Image: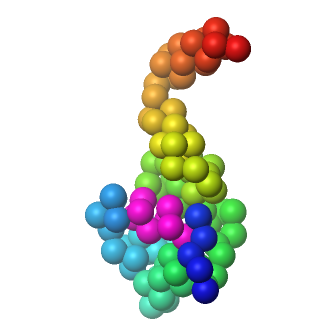
Amino acid sequence: MTSSTLSIRLKQARLRAKLSQEELGIRIGLEPASASARMNRYELGKRTPDPELIQRVATELRLPAAYFYACQDDEAELLERYHALSAEAKAELMGLLQGLE
């Protein structure tokens, strides 16, 4: 089975956070006995996590849930960077973007 965008981004984000599959699974509320196996299946694309689980992962890793679904790397990076901005910086950026239209 081919890895999906979601599975690839999930693994990349987890590795950047320096968490094992088990650690991340437990932090998002999976049963400790199955956390590693379940996260492994999600990262291999053998199972697709539901949106609620992705939201828990996103919250734990301080990313927007949309990051995991972005097909293009530059879009994923943009989502990640935007999410990290303060409310003031987000408003400023939106103003800049409107000026480009």
Q: Is residue 86 above or below residue 69?
A: above
Quadrant (top left/top right/bottom left/bottom right) for the C terminus? top right
Indicate left or right for 4 with 36 as reference: right
Residue 61 rendering spot, x and y as whole percentages: 44, 55
Residue 24 rendering spot, x and y as whole percentages: 42, 70
Residue at image position (34%, 65%) is 15
Q: Can residue 32 be seen in the rendering of this structure? A: no
Which is the main secondary structure of the residues drawn in magenta?
helix
13 or 38, which is in the foreground?
13
Residue at image position (40%, 76%) is 21
Q: Can residue 81 be seen in the rendering of this structure? A: yes
Residue 7 rendering spot, x and y as whole percentages: 55, 70
Task: Residue lying at the far left in this picture: please name it.
Answer: 18
| Part of the protein shown in magenta | 7-14
Residue at image position (46%, 56%) is 60
Indicate left or right for 86 with 79 as reference: left
